[in-house]
Image (cartoon, coloured by chain):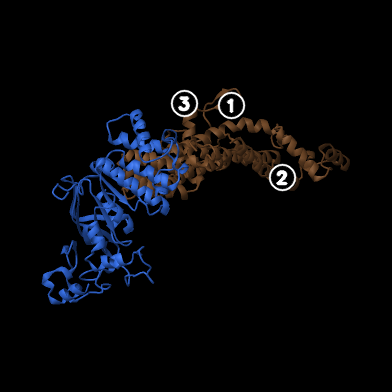
Chain colours: A blue, B brown
């Protein structure tokens, strides 16, 4: 997978929000690749910048947010600086998007069929009649029963899970190469979540679509993603193959995150938790943003900001894994 | 649906009865109709005879019942001032007011909605700022002043348009219309601008506020994420979702335009119901005032019903039980 050219290349992406009290840096120096057919999971706490990364990729940052630096390339073509009109032909056609809450994502006044047809006729060289036929096929594909009848129903006539299936059909119907799924199951009942994730996974594999799956649910990531990026305070803390990140995390934050997932195999008295909370964007500490909460913090963490470096099986932005950090780090590493 | 219409009509009945009661009370408490009809010299016997003839010696509710029954048949009595049947007077004047009100409402929608969409989409352009400032004038200047300023500019200085009256009208059955002659249309321009300006700015501000609200919703963001054209997003998805409140306000405002055409009709000496009403107030012509009050109430009730029905047309979520597919 890694010897092919990446489908999506994000390099040193920086997103800023100019506010009255100064500029907030929401994303800082974020770099990652997504290869054709690959599912990249993006996890982190609320406000870590996961959804912001997705919004930047589809070019729909909420104003006044703006890309202040770095590049985003899709199949070798830069898309972060495209004029709005050109970016429009990328959205939907080359990058599909799935949002969090299916109850608010669909226009309540249009039938689901109309929304599917308009998406396809906008991007594909087909007429309304053919688009309608394909719309029924898509509804069947995402598991809507009696699709031929339901195509003329309005969104409020579907349940939440069914609506998210419609949203998935809408995201995929122009056959994009990449799907940006922003917490696609968070708003759904737990019993429906697994179905929707399974559907997404199957469809992405069948169509060879790559996916960026933003979620705070490690279970979903472990089951779906090939690789995973852990975000903290607008930066990537750790990135690597999913089994390595889950089984052998390197960054102290990831270790803490994995410790806060209840294991099914044995009972714990109490879930482990990470002390403190993620800093606000206006008060990101100097050096490593995680240093005030990190159990292994040492001097260098408070002054210098770590970049992603090879660490055991993954890449982590942590000084513990820099040989230049010296003996102190080596001792901590041995303990951890 | 028919059940809904019937229930709305039933709800309207108490409203109409209450208004009827108020109109009826005017006869008893605003001036003495017997004194007005008898003039200066009369004997007590003459007065008693008239009171008996008119049924004024009967209990209040019997009199009220008779008033309602008569009103239902369009019988509002004779105008004190003009000594003609009130219904004839109103029917004669209604076309003038209705044509003026419809033109004003049409103008308000035709200009107000696009201005609202524009200012909602391009919040910070200088044209939007200009529209908003301009709308403040529309909201804050009193109608009579706008009318007088328009007359001064276009009738007195420029001499382009007539300053009063309906111009030439054409009779179509009992309806007299000003739409069919050039003079009639010219005479409509200034009064309808005067009457519609406030509504236009109101509609503009409403559409703008609704657009801003709708443009923030997830389904608009999703429509953009699907790569739909701006045209489809703005004029399809967004505009349609702003329509429900716009229909409500426009409907209610249409009632208001008709009811409050009084000032405009006075300024332009427009021979409509408003002018008739204001002249009747001056002469304490109670039958006309009572009939006008009832008519306006009926108008509001009817418009409200139409507005409610339009909701069904716009918003599928309201069509409970009418859904397909379940």
Report the disc number at residue A290. Answer: none
Instruction: For marks 1 and 2, give the CA distance.
Output: 30 Å
Query: Callout 2: 10 Å neighbours few (<14), some, many (20+)?
Result: some
- Image location of residue A78, percent across then percent down: 17, 47
Q: Nearer the viewer, residue B267 or A210?
A: A210
What residue is disc 2 on? Answer: B21
Q: Nearer the viewer, residue B171 or A324?
A: A324
- Residue that appears at 58% across and 39% down: B305
Quadrant of the rendering where the N terminus of chain B is positioned = top right
Please say whether residue B148 is visible from this viewpoint. no
Q: Nearer the viewer, mark 3 or mark 2?
A: 2
- Residue A69 image-quadrant placement: bottom left
Q: Are the residues under marks 3 and 1 on the same chain?
A: yes
Answer above or below: position of A243 versus A118: below
- Residue A250 image-quadrant placement: bottom left
Q: Nearer the viewer, mark 3 or mark 1?
A: 1
- Residue that appears at 38% across and 34% down: A136
- Image location of residue A314, percent across then percent down: 19, 61
Instruction: For marks 3 and 1, give the CA distance.
Output: 18 Å
Report the disc number at residue B175. Answer: 1
Query: Furthest-left residue in view?
Result: A324
Chain identity of mark 1: B
Q: Earlier in the sequence, mark 3 or mark 1?
A: 1
Query: Callout 3: 10 Å neighbours few (<14), some, many (20+)?
Result: few
What residue is disc 3 on? Answer: B182
Chain identity of mark 2: B
């Amino acid at each position: 997978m890694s010897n092919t050219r990446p489908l999506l290349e994000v390099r040193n992406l920086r997103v800023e929000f100019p506010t009255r009290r100064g500029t907030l840096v929401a994303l800082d120096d974020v770099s990652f690749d997504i290869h054709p057919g690959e599912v990249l999971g993006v996890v982190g706490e609320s406000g870590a910048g996961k959804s912001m990364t997705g919004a930047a990729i589809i070019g729909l940052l909420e104003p006044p947010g703006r890309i202040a630096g770095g590049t985003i390339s899709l199949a070798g073509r830069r898309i972060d600086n495209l004029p709005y009109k050109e970016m429009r032909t990328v959205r939907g056609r080359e990058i599909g998007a799935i949002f969090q809450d299916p109850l608010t994502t669909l226009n309540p006044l249009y039938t689901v069929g109309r929304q599917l047809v308009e998406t396809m006729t906008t991007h594909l060289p087909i007429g309304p009649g053919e688009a309608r036929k394909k719309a029924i096929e898509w509804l069947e594909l995402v598991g809507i029963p009696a699709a031929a009848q339901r195509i003329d129903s309005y969104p409020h006539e579907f349940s939440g899970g069914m609506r998210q299936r419609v949203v998935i059909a809408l995201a995929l119907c122009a056959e994009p190469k990449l799907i940006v799924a922003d917490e696609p199951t968070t708003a759904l009942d737990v019993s429906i979540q697994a179905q929707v994730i399974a559907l997404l996974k199957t469809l992405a594999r069948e169509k060879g679509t790559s996916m960026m799956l933003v979620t705070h649910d490690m279970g979903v990531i472990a089951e779906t993603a090939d690789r995973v990026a852990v975000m903290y305070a607008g930066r990537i803390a750790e990135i690597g193959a999913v089994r390595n990140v889950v089984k052998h995390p390197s960054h102290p934050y990831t270790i803490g995150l994995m410790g806060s997932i209840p294991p099914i195999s044995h009972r714990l008295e109490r879930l482990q938790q990470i002390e403190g909370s993620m800093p606000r964007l206006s008060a990101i500490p100097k050096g490593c943003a995680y240093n005030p909460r990190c159990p292994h913090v040492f001097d260098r963490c408070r002054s210098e900001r770590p970049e992603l470096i090879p660490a055991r099986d993954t890449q982590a932005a942590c000084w513990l894994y820099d040989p230049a950090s010296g003996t102190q780090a080596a001792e901590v590493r041995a303990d951890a | 649906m028919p059940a809904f219409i019937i229930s709305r009509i039933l709800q309207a009945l108490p409203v109409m009865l209450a208004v009827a009661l108020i109109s009826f009370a005017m006869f008893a408490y605003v001036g003495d109709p017997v004194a007005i009809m008898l003039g200066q010299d009369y004997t007590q016997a003459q007065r008693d005879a008239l009171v008996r003839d008119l049924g004024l010696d009967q209990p209040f509710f019997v009199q009220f019942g008779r008033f309602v029954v008569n009103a239902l048949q369009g019988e509002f009595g004779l105008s004190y001032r003009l000594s003609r049947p009130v219904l004839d007077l109103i029917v004669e004047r209604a076309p003038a007011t209705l044509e003026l009100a419809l033109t004003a409402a049409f103008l308000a929608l035709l200009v107000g909605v696009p201005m609202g969409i524009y200012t909602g989409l391009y919040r910070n352009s200088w044209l939007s700022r200009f529209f908003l400032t301009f709308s403040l004038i529309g909201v804050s200047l009193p109608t009579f002043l706008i009318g007088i300023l328009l007359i001064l500019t276009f009738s007195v200085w420029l001499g382009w348009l007539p300053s009063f009256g309906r111009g030439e009208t054409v009779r179509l059955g009992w309806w007299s219309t000003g739409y069919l002659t050039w003079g009639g249309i010219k005479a409509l321009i200034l009064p309808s601008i005067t009457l519609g300006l406030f509504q236009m700015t109101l509609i503009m501000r409403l559409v703008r506020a609704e657009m801003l609200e709708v443009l923030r919703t997830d389904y608009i963001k999703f429509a953009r994420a699907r790569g739909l054209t701006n045209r489809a997003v703005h004029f399809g998805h967004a505009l349609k979702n702003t329509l429900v409140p716009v229909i409500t306000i426009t409907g209610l405002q249409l009632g208001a335009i008709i009811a409050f055409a009084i000032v405009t009709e006075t300024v332009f000496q427009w021979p409509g119901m408003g002018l008739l009403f204001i002249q009747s107030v001056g002469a304490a012509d109670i039958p006309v005032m009572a009939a006008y009050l009832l008519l306006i109430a009926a108008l509001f009730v009817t418009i409200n019903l139409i507005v409610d029905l339009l909701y069904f047309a716009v918003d599928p979520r309201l069509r409970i039980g009418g859904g397909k597919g379940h």
